[in-house]
Amino acid sequence: MTSKITRRDFLNGVAIGAGTILLMPGQLLAQSAGFTATNKFPSDYYPPTLTGMRGSHEGSYEVAHALAWNGQKPAVYQELDEHYDLVVVGAGQSGLAAAWYYQKKMGPTAKILLLDNHDDFGGHAKRNEFHQDGNMVLGLGGAQNIEPMSSYSAMAVELLKDIGVDDQALAAMTANTPDDYMLGGKISANNGMTIPTTDGHKTLSGNWLGFFHGGQGYEAAVKELPIPEEEQTKLIAFFGGDRDFLDDLSLLEQYRYVKSVSYNQFLTERVGLAEETLPILGAFTSVLLGPAGWSLTVLEALSTGCPGLKAMGWLTNRLSDLAGAFVLGDAPVAYMFPDGDASVARLLVHKLIPDVAPAMKGFEDVAISNFNYAALDLDSNPTRMRLNSTVVGVKETDVNHVKVDYVQQGQPFSVSADHCVLACYNGLIPHLCPEMSKEQREGLSYGVKVPFVYANVLLKNGRAFAGLGTTFTQCPYDPFQWVSAAPTVTSGGYQPPQSLTIQWQYL
């Protein structure tokens, strides 16, 4: 329970929580029509502009659920006259990377097919694109940031550099991110706290990530919280490190305590906080990891940046490399495209299938380039991608070949390949390959996904949000626990709205 949580887990799409992204100005586009013919798309097919549920959307899960829950799948498949060197199940970041590595090793003529059950590629790296009055506004829809190159393996760095994301690009992304945009890695920016009161919500601007750890001004900030004075006093002592809350335990007992007792139990029993106060300390934990403080040990909570390191006495010197690095100012900076990691997925797709955007240069214009989805699945391309295609079976037919069955738009098909990579939801894999061993099944069931909910709202007028004095605020007592302005970064050629309202909001 004490494995280190890295910055790569920051909003990676498998954590619980909710965040609202505010986009301005304008309203949402109408949805484009779906396609009806296998491998073919209508001229207006462009998933990034679709609205509604865009993660596991309708049409993406029904076939898989029928297989996993009821053991139902087609008995007969139309065998297409298509044989590939590699079939990749899943066109998210992992699947796209698998295709890239294979193409890199085997050469550009290797025949590769990516199959994905969703209507768009990228998986958790979802692109949200809005158009109003001739302007395009981009928002986040999942995985959102890149880390410094030092955080990745040599193989991952090779991939990033090949698609144009190198140290020079990261430096440009830093320069292209306003200093007041916290989600873009500017941790010293104001990040507010919004608490409901009898007179409506009260938003307190300031660097609350710093206040949690005794940063400058924390006492005055805590005294502004609309909570009982007794709770304010306890929080001030806790944030400031006025005492060691484990000083009655021996060193061994302290070690065992932080590895076995839940964070919230520590806050109630040792710090003396009322349960009603705990959400103020738990919004980041819920969003970043999923479980609340009742399900995390003290050590696990500290390692994600939760308050308390300064109130641990001996632990201060021994755990400083684990706890809250990014809020204390010595952690790696996050780098962000205006549509989050969707641009990384687009760069990978463009590298694999250049015809999707022939005029696109790469890093400098990926955010503004229009992708032609009709070019994803052309016979003339060695690498192809087939969306809206749910794989229901993968089986070795002999020593050298694999048969892959899938359902697309209600029609069952199968293709053959020399190799197959399963880069899809781990819980479905045993149903795709029922011949696998019990040990393999148990291993795949270890990881559990927890839903992460984004809501993108396009506003015509941003004056009310601008009046909060921050581009990001925590809402620990509300369903959406993070509320942020949409990315104001300009990487990839994107220019966010520049009206007076927007300028006021981000100043």
Image (spheres, rainbow, N blue to C red):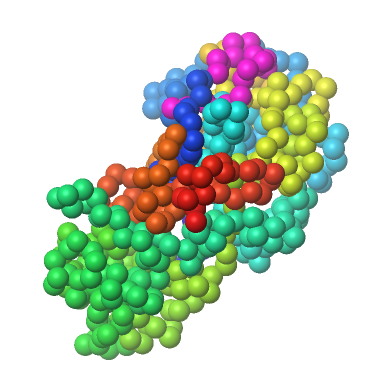
Determine which quarter of the picture holds residue 376.
top right
Residue 469 against residue 424 in the figure, above or below: below
Q: Residue 44 lies in magenta, yes or no?
A: yes
Residue depicted at x 54% and y 56%:
184
The count of marks equals 0
Quarter that holds the N terminus:
bottom left
Residue depicted at x 62% and y 20%:
45
Residue 450 against residue 249 in the figure, above or below: above
Determine which quarter of the picture holds residue 371.
top right
Task: Name the spot of residue 316 as percent of width and height, x first.
Answer: 39, 83
Task: Name the spot of residue 421 as percent of width and height, x first.
Answer: 65, 39
Residue 41 against residue 269 in the figure, above or below: above
Residue 193 placement, left or right of 505: left
Magenta: main secondary structure: loop
Nearer-the-camera pick, 196 or 51: 196
Q: Residue 445 lies in magenta, yes or no?
A: no
Residue depicted at x 83% and y 22%:
380
Nearer-the-camera pick, 396 or 4: 4
Residue 368 against residue 397 in the figure, above or below: below
Q: Which residues are magenta?
A: 32-52
Task: Name the spot of residue 73 as percent of width and height, x first.
Answer: 49, 19
Residue 467 placement, left or right of 415: left
**Is any atom of residue 277 visible in this view?**
yes
